[in-house]
Image (spheres, grey):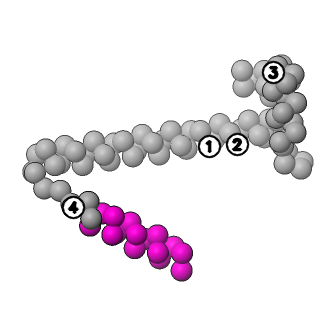
Amino acid sequence: MLASLAQGGAEPELREELESLLNPGETVSEFVETAVLRAVRFRRERRHFHGRGEAAWRSYQRTGLSVPAGDVLASLQAKLDACRQ
């Protein structure tokens, strides 16, 4: 579908909507390339996220040690607060 979309072979309604949403000077090919790159990055990050979660779970099963949820939330809140300053 991507190849046909970039070459104009998509359903007319989809192509019309896509073209109406392009940024000034942006081509359909550029839009498709950007979308694919974002999807690849998202899936890579999701895979890494799941990998870290699995590693943490295995570590907990092996050691029985964990970080209390309140400590994790406090750490995340501190990071968020720092970003807002």
Left or right position of 22 against 2: right
Q: Earlier in the sequence, mark 2 or mark 4?
A: 2
Estimate how packed mark 1 is, as few (under 14), some (14 to 19) or many (20 or more) residues with alpha carbons within 10 Å.
few
Mark 1 and mark 2 residues within 8 Å of each other at the beta carbon: yes
Q: Which residue is mark 4?
A: 68
Q: In which quadrant of the rendered image does the C terminus lie?
A: bottom right
Q: Secondary structure at mark 2?
A: helix
Q: Is residue 80 magenta?
A: yes
Identify residue for label 1: 38
Kind of element beneath mark 1 = helix
Please, what is the three-letter code of the amino acid marked with disc 3?
Answer: Ala
Q: Tell me the crowding category of disc 3: few under 14, some 14 to 19, or many 20 or more residues within 10 angstroms, Cα based.
A: some
Sequence-wise first label, 4 or 3:
3
Within the magenta stretch, is there residue 19?
A: no
Q: Position of residue 37 (x, y in %)?
A: 63, 41
Q: Secondary structure at mark 4?
A: loop
What secondary structure is the magenta-colored segment mainly?
A: helix
Q: CA distance from mark 1 to mark 2?
A: 6 Å
The correct choice, above or below, for 21 with respect to 71 in the image is above
Q: CA distance from mark 4 to mark 3?
A: 51 Å
> To which residue does mark 2 refer?
34
Secondary structure at badge 3 equals: loop
Q: CA distance from mark 3 to mark 1?
A: 21 Å
- Is residue 12 positioned above or below 29 on the image? above
For this orientation, the residue located farthest to the front is: 70
* For residue 70, side relative to residue 6 (left or right): left
Question: Compared to 26, does 2 lie above or below?
Answer: above
